[in-house]
Image: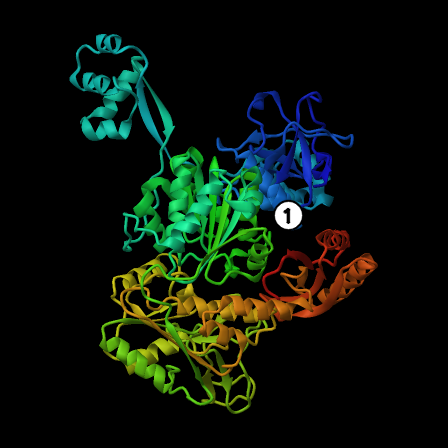
Amino acid sequence: MMSMSAHDAGTSARARNEDRALVEVAVSLPVAGMFHYRVPARLDGRAGVGARVLVPFGARQVSGVIVRAPAELVAPGKVLEVADIVGDDPLPPDLVALCVWIAEYYEAPIGEALRAAVPAGTQVTAADVVAPTETGVAAAAGEGAALPPKQRDLLAQIVHAGRLPRAKIARARHADLDALAKRGLVTIGLARSAARIKPQTERVARLAVPVDEALARLARAPKRMAIVQALADGPRAIAELAAQIPGASAAVRELANAGAIVVEKRELVPEAAATPDLPAASTPPVLTAQQRAALDAITAAASRAPIGTDADQATRGGFAAFLVHGVTGSGKTEVYLHAIAHALARGKSAIVLVPEISLTPQLAARFRARFGDQVAVLHSGMSDRERLDEWLRLRRGHARIALGARSAIFAPVADLGVIVVDEEHDGSFKQDEGVRYHGRDVALVRAQKAGAICVLGSATPSLESYANAREGRYTLLEMPDRATPKPLPAVEILDLRKFMPDGDAMLSAPLAAAIAETLEHGDQAILFLNRRGFATFVVCRACGHAFRCPHCSVSLTYHQHADRLLCHYCGYGQRVPEVCAGCNTRGAIERKGLGTERVAEALAERFPRARVARLDRDVASGAKAEAILARVARREVDLLVGTQMVTKGHDFPGVTLVGVLCADTGLSLPDFRASERTFQLLTQVAGRAGRGDRAGRVIVQTYKPEASAVTFAARHDYAGFFEVETEERRDLGYPPHGRVVALRIDGPDPGAVAKTAERLAQLAGVIAKGAPVDVRGPAPAPLARLRGRTRWQIWLRSPDRAALRRVVRGVGTAEVASGVRVGVDVDPSSTL
């Protein structure tokens, strides 16, 4: 990454101690490059790689992370000093190196990449703050010598505010501010913000002198004697002493005043985050032959024992990548658990990534049943306090397994032995804002840098991962059979052009009969519809006016429980009007289309004795999702209706029927991955059926029964789908046959965005001339307006990553209009 002198970041006084050690710092701001700072003598020994620091940057101090120490100055100039070290927990150097790679590969600011590795709420900043003195307050009231008008107005503004950040005072008025400071009317000082979340501490007491000497000073006071005797075996928490010895707090103060004991703060060892009450076996089952073969390959590589030619190549340097392609119910999770147990036995640690928060509770319960408090859970559904506590347990070595969604790849584990990416195909591993990294690919790089094993697992691998396995970059481990004697469920395709769905439940006659039969046998069913809400759009039947979000180019969805129209992208909401805004007709507003809310209500009416629950983002986030999943696991739910949240790896033995209400919702999207995603969703949701003692059945309703995603999913034929889909992408140069970068341009002014996109596309074409880079666009994004910002995009395709990078970095030097943002999306997962 490009580095620059810190004088570009601010105009503070000339740095002192020019002979002090230099370090390079990545500041936590969306700026390119790193900055040089000198380390003052008082911070010697603490300013190493990974240390979190405060540094001067412009008119304020910002947080950052030391990336290189010591460093060499590239260009002469003034070099400022590191202001302070923040916290006692530097990031591990290997994690810093990983963030540097992320910044370079994904063309992102290094400071932004490092922010993802720092626990939320622990950042500290500081800025110059202006405050009036008593003399200044009197002067503003007209007492004392008269001031020039501009200084008088500025002083009145400062007095009115009480405290005012210097950055909010226009640069043109800084001369007036300096004049007020010289007169003693205002003070300019640095104000530091405290971290919102800090490690929890407790007060502890320890003996300052030998026990006999301490007892000799006590005049045989019983309470003080009891405390000394309690401390004879080592330090104790004062709260613990107070609970055991009445009046201990006063006695502790007396002992401390007498010099017999010392009272100090000690960091509390955080307790493990609570996991939901879900059934999980603590005793490992006997592995099937397929599970044993996969595990043997993984553990042999972890022990650096070659297994044949492919493994010889894969295990060079200690790193090996495996793709476990196992059908739903084949027992992939049990292979993960055994592989992690093997790593722990060798003194190593592990990271397990899952695609959704909804998966975390069930998997956490299963991992905790096997490994206890060795498991630390990390995901965005937790509070900042909970996440910091789990982060500290990993950093301190109290836990050695990090389990969570995408961002858990930044867990501060030491001696990494294995990384597991479960459901590696899932699109939620791709970050779609800020630093647009892909959790699966970062996992592979982290494992490679650590000399660890990376295990990718899925019943429906991404086309890129399966291609890499076929080409020998990963070792392919096939598990084509379920771990139980029950086979994969039979799948029946129903053509909705022949079997018309009846009513709001979207049930064809065969599916309705199958649900009734399932309920009669006391079994459970899952119904999948990838649309939230009660009505997917609202329209006036008199004039055709459709209600759309004013900030996004999408229809508003009606949610009956809130009686509101809501945008699923920006959160905008409004009441359903009684009068149409387009034609002023009263009573002509109709709710059209079906979502999970309406389907669940209709099912409850159709099957009144059934217990119906919904699982979608409107009703199930964080703890609510855990509660719904727990009810299903306890068989307190008969019919579960949901969006793709119900497809995610859940293991419910009572589910014998899965119904897909409409398989076509994703097929028509303007996205080159639309068919792949549909195949994955159908295969995954079908895999929820028949995982217990009773055989499963799947019914797929569709208007496109001939679509390859539908037909191959019905046959559980991943290899066949892979051949057809990769061949279709070959001519277009889409992954896995080429690399893609999307330049995403957005802003509030549609004209400025369009002009910027046109200019950047022309520049990309000039830079790409003669190189194997195809420039497509510019064009409005399929979702052309989002959260009040117009969106355009330019797509760059090439088999040569270096050529793509040259074009992207060349375009990145262009000036853009004010208010317009240009985002770089390397390896985009969606065209939307």
The residue nearer to you, when weighing 212 against 156, is: 212
Q: Residue at x 23, y 28 (%)?
A: 242
Q: Is residue 515 above or below residue 346?
A: below
Q: Is residue 463 left or right of residue 820?
A: left
Quarter of the image where one finds residue 825: bottom right
| Number of residues whose C-alpha sits closer than 10 Å to that of mark 1, classed few (under 14), some (14–19) or many (20 or more) | some
Specify the quadrant that holds the C terminus: bottom right
Residue type, numbered disc 1: Pro
Residue that label 1 marks? 30
The percent coordinates of residue 31 (x first, y second) are: 67, 46
Locate residue 165, reporting x and y percent. 60, 42
- Which residue occupies the extreme bottom position in the image? 542
From the viewer's perspective, is residue 44 above or below residue 60? above
Q: Nearer the viewer, residue 502 or 66?
A: 502
Q: In the picture provided, is 575 more to the left or to the right than 128?
A: left
Left or right, 203 with respect to 394, comes to left
Specify whether residue 531 is in view: no
Image position, residue 469 (x, y; %): 56, 55
Q: For residue 660, what is the image quadrant?
A: bottom left
